[in-house]
Amino acid sequence: MKETKICVIGLGYVGLPLARLFSTKYKTVGFDMNMRRCEALMAGHDATLEVSDELLQEAINNHSLVCTADIEQIRDCNFYVVAVPTPVDENNNPDLTPLYGASTTVGKVISKGDVVVYESTVYPGVTEDECIPVVEKISGMKFNEDFFAGYSPERINPGDKKHTVEHIKKVTSGSTPEIGQYVNAIYSSVIIAGTHLAPTIKVAEAAKVIENSQRDINIAFVNELSHIFNKMGIDTLDVLEAAGTKWNFLPFRPGLVGGHCIGVDPYYLAQCAQRHGHNPEIILAGRRMNDGMGEYVATETVKHMLKKGIQVLNSEIIILGFTLQNVIETSLRNLWITVTVLLVFGILLWMVDAKARQNKTMNDMTYRDAFLFGLGQSMALIPGVSRSGGTITVGRALGYTREAAVRLSFLMAIPAVFGSGLLEAIKAVKNYKTDAMFPGWGPTLVAMVISFVLGYIVIIGFLKFVSNFSYKAFAIYRIGLAVVVALLLIVGVLPAIDPSVVAAA
């Protein structure tokens, strides 16, 4: 058999750690549709923090790991691993769209004798009945004759620095006994915790969905106990502690069910059961119980606040660990939000600039104004709001002159720019000998000087411009851009949410 070259499709919290690990033994390419994600990874930083900068840079510089959005760079691979999200839709039905997309990608590049292994959560039968037909159609090749498949469910726990991918026992499988052995050998060569070769792909798929379904049902049971004991005035944790003295009692605790899989996998199993004519009463009952725990916790919190004499109205509550990054990304990185913000802030800046007083200078700065300027700068976290635009808008609303608002905006940027620049400089100096992307000290110094000079010229020119003219042109530009993007969304040219962001999350 020819030398194994691995391609991992999807560089999220599952795919990237796996690609990094494979690169220690095999030539490995990480493929993701999100070009910015790939560029950031090749620069040596994983924004999800699943892989440390040190390990990532070691993989890139010492093990030749390549992260790319160019499909041509994965054509010479022969072992493809699909690690894309498998969410549920608004009706809690499995959404296989990312899997279909990844299978299409594989079909475009797969060659005779190659193997594709799926790691995404699915119900039994999806790999062979849903994904493989897509690969066959796109490639024009025949399954188990021209190419082969396997399934090895992901078990990673995002954010867990102890149970990393190499320290979690891996279930493997193949479309033929020989391929099963081959897939198992590839994984066992890098997985320290060992592997378990399942007899068929469907067995491996089923093993994955019942893992979290079992946890979901057990948690639902203790959640229901908490409802019962709360009505009886009994402390649930005291009961569980007493019951836990028996050697075979399972130590589950009541609470909200979170994570990336535990609230999803049961729906995949339930869908599979319903397709085969069985109503999964226990599984769905557990889901209903756990889905209702948010409302239950909120209600009980209000009750306890009232008992303690805490005013509920206008109370401030902080929720820690509210959601995962992929939810944030796919919720906020929405072009409709960007359109709205562009439009609102364009109109707001136009009105504020036209109606605001122009009598305050930098010497009139107060603590209150400084705080409001800071809030204006923080609005840059909202897609569609520029840091300087938010700051200047607040400054004009407070009655500062155009020149003063702009000067304050640039002055407030200095600590952030200097701090980030210093941090990157330290990283560059620290790793310049091993960083393959380091261009050398000469080009680096030249780039620094040029960027400083050009930045200074732009700032001076901008200050002179706004001192004599209004922001009307800039406001019109933002409003026009919002209209153009909205039209492109309506006609379907642009998606509201970038599919590559979803795949990378």
Image: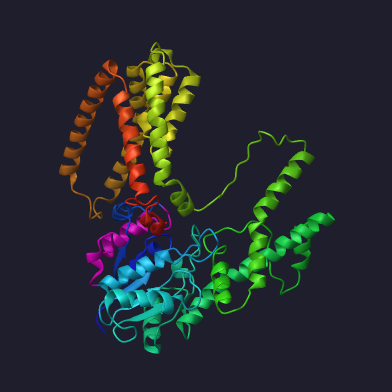
| 110 drawn magenta | no
- Of all residues, the one furthest to the front in this rendering is 491
Q: Which part of the image, by quadrant, shows the N terminus?
A: bottom left
Question: Is 173 in front, or is 477?
Answer: 477
| Position of 293 relative to 416 (above/below) | below
Q: From which residue to which does the magenta span run?
A: 48-76
- Rendered location of residue 121, percent (x, y): 48, 69
Residue sticking out furthest to the right: 232
**Residue for point 33% across, 22% down:** 406
Question: In screen coordinates, is 240 left or right of 43?
Answer: right
Task: Give the quadrant of residue 192.
Answer: bottom left
Residue occupying the far bottom of the picture: 177
Left or right of 426: which side holds 325?
Answer: right
Left or right: where 480 falls relative to 298: left
Res 426 → quadrant? top left
User: Quick check: can you spot residue 327?
Assistant: yes
Q: Quadrant of the C terminus?
A: bottom left
In the rendered view, tell whether residue 242 sits above or below residue 477. Answer: below
* Residue drawn at (41%, 27%) of the image: 348
Q: Position of residue 72 (x, y in %)?
A: 22, 65
Question: Is residue 5 in view from this perspective?
Answer: no
Name the foreground residue: 453 vs 343.
Answer: 343
Query: How far across and how far down the image is residue 29, in percent?
Result: 29, 66
Residue 443 appears at what percent x and percent y? 16, 43
Kindly identify the residue that appears in the image at 31 percent across and 71 percent down: 106
